[in-house]
Image (cartoon, coloured by chain):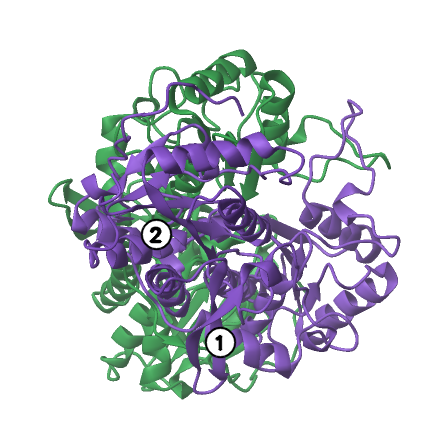
Chain colours: A purple, B green
Amino acid sequence: MANEIPNAFYAQSGGVTAVINASAAGVIETARQHPDRIGKVYAGRNGIIGALLEDLIDTSLESDEAIAALKHTPSGAFGSCRYKLKSLEENKAEYERLIEVFRAHNIRYFFYNGGGDSMDTAHKVSMLSERMNFPIQCIGIPKTVDNDLPITDNCPGFGSVAKYVAVSIKEAAFDVASMAKTSTKVFVLEVMGRHAGWIAAAGGLAAEREGDAPHVILFPEIPFDQEAFLARVKHAVETWGYCALVVSEGVRTADGQFLSDAGTTDAFGHKQLGGVAPLIAQMVKQHLGYKYHWAVADYLQRAARHIASKTDVEQAYAMGKAAVEMALAGKNAVMPTIERLSDAPYRWQVGEAPLSAVANVEKKLPRDFITADGFGITEKARRYLQPLIEGEDYPPYVNGLPYYVRLKNILVPKKLPEDFTL
Amino acid sequence: MANEIPNAFYAQSGGVTAVINASAAGVIETARQHPDRIGKVYAGRNGIIGALLEDLIDTSLESDEAIAALKHTPSGAFGSCRYKLKSLEENKAEYERLIEVFRAHNIRYFFYNGGGDSMDTAHKVSMLSERMNFPIQCIGIPKTVDNDLPITDNCPGFGSVAKYVAVSIKEAAFDVASMAKTSTKVFVLEVMGRHAGWIAAAGGLAAEREGDAPHVILFPEIPFDQEAFLARVKHAVETWGYCALVVSEGVRTADGQFLSDAGTTDAFGHKQLGGVAPLIAQMVKQHLGYKYHWAVADYLQRAARHIASKTDVEQAYAMGKAAVEMALAGKNAVMPTIERLSDAPYRWQVGEAPLSAVANVEKKLPRDFITADGFGITEKARRYLQPLIEGEDYPPYVNGLPYYVRLKNILVPKKLPEDFTL
């Protein structure tokens, strides 16, 4: 047993992205290049839950071709989860179970691919391994469409959502512009970003010259001012003939309440069905009388691998690869980061951050990325965002549809006598 | 004047598509190849309104490169409109004005690019030309994302929306599937098609093997049966772990009422803000308790030139080209059609239909395209739909965004003394 080559555990955590599987490919392909150091990569089925339940997928049974196809497959190939481990004090049993499972399967590397909460979990596992005298190297792999992790210049997953939103508002605005004379004058696109306006800001990239859409962006960082907003919409329609808006789902009133929670109910007394786009559109209609249309991109934006950013795909892969290389270099409790060297031409390199500095820190959109009036992005924001949507990386197509791989996901035989209750 | 080479009028009508500009390119490029027969192509600004207001764009002032770029530019490059000419009896003045404008600008070809209403208008103009002894050849060019024109096997614009919807539900379903264990179990995508379920049906192409999404499609043609619907959703979640749905905006109750008009109002007593997806999602939550997400694609679907069907782009161009060739062949009151020769391999050719047979006829989704239970598509539908989404035809990209052309749209000097009031 002692001479056996140690195995690795890899899991995907939280909301998935168009490129998180590229990170998985980076981990698995790099591990496969070091069979003397890393035995097998076991993936947790449905994220960390897979470790707790000893529900482990043997990725060594997947072909090289299947693993390569992960680079162009959205979603979490092994299943992800929304499951936050409690603090060590609150639920020591969970952490002990993790170590028990790792010990049973000779897992000595722990790769956790997620956002702020996940980096916190990875950090806790690394502390636990010291405390329980079970050597395991914990490496975080950044991932979030929200782009809100600290230290790293940006997060894999964000660039592709950013590209999707910028392309979508550009296209929809072309549509509206061509019909505005006799039809829809106001179009509202709702995008993700409950707490930070990075995704909404990315919509601003579509505006390449004066008068271009989006004419208004509503950020979670800027309290919603109905009067100023309506004046702005009116001005756009009167100046350009139409108004195309990008609205963050997280836009709030001055008292911090989500606009989408503003208390509307339907005829049955149910809470309003959600979606700030219809609310905003209705407000415009009511006060300005303009005909409107609205769209809610929801999961389409974070799943849209068909229009992924090439930069994003490359960075996601690089993070997975770097994580394995850091583990092989003997590192622990760290996360690879993206370090920007220059904006134009865009150059970046892999950096490193301690998990303790990443865990639970949320990076908001800086105020100087938003114009003074609160409705647009600044040149500084544009310089930051533009490289992240750069490049196309199309998946292969079969019968007019993207070919996305589905792995065999064959489970590793269980070794522990007991089941674990979540 | 009599010896002058006659000019052509071209206009875009109704809701735009990802490929209507490819038809425009087909018209203009083909006309340019026959300078001895066609002088200039004047485009109506904002569709037929441009003819009524003598608001004509001189397309001869656009470069060959700009016209070629129309092939990959969504929306209506000259502006479209929602403006239905009344019947000849009701508003003869409008038709007379058209002839007056055409006479003033020596326009002898009338190309009208639109759906059923537009073919009706083109037909009326052709009748008027006879009655008023003003020779003008009227050729319709089919266009509609709704795919509801008769005679032609399919309509340019539809294939690209179909591809967008099939790709989007496939991608979103991958996302949902990977998170379903601990998060969203039901995902609803609302698509266009107020009166016919062609677009919703196209979502069915994403289901390539058993258990694939969409697990449920709701068509306007099938009265909504809440009990059967909920049972179906429950079955999908229990069998596959999740349920991804495509819902047509036009889904109706048994009494013919749109489900989205089902009388919900918000706290202020306003009518519910629209969108059948949130309604359906809420219904699932209320009766089955599943966590849901929903998206409304709205204009994103018909503007999505970035993921256009190559087949669709080619057909749109071919229709514009054929229209000019028909005019040159002395034809009148006809519309080029797409004739399917075989499903697999897909082969098609240009056909011809009289405008009188096309005008105001709406082609619904045949019942045998929908499964007996009303929630899916049949093999017959699949054979019909599949070729229409075949092939990718990506636009060029600059700075991570598609490059879409904006024409100069320089107006032709007015010749008539009077303004016309719409």
Residues at marks 1 and 2, CA–CA distance in whole angstroms = 21 Å
Q: Which of the image's four quarters has the C terminus of chain B?
A: bottom right
Q: Nearer the viewer, residue A229 or B177?
A: B177
Q: Is residue B362 among what the camera can see?
A: no
Name which residue lies at 48% across and 58% down. Answer: B13
Q: Are marks 1 and 2 in contact (CB under 8 Å)?
A: no
Mark 1 secondary-structure assignment: strand
Mark 2 secondary-structure assignment: helix
What is the number of the mark on residue A385?
Answer: none
Mark closer to the chain start, 1 or 2:
2
Label 2 Cα crowd, 10 Å radius (few <14 / some 14-19 / many 20+): many
Name which residue lies at 23% across and 80% down. Answer: B34
> Horizontal and vertical percent for residue A398?
21, 48
What is the number of the mark on residue A339?
Answer: 1
Q: Quadrant of residue A317?
A: bottom left
Label 1 Cα crowd, 10 Å radius (few <14 / some 14-19 / many 20+): some
Label 1 sits on what residue type? Glu
Label 2 sits on what residue type? Ala
Q: Is residue A369 left or right of residue A57?
A: right
Is residue A394 depicted above or below A348 in this figure?
Answer: above
Is residue A65 depicted above or below A100 in this figure?
Answer: below
> Horizontal and vertical percent for residue B239?
38, 19
Q: Quadrant of residue A213?
A: bottom right
Which residue lies under the disc numbered 2?
Answer: A24
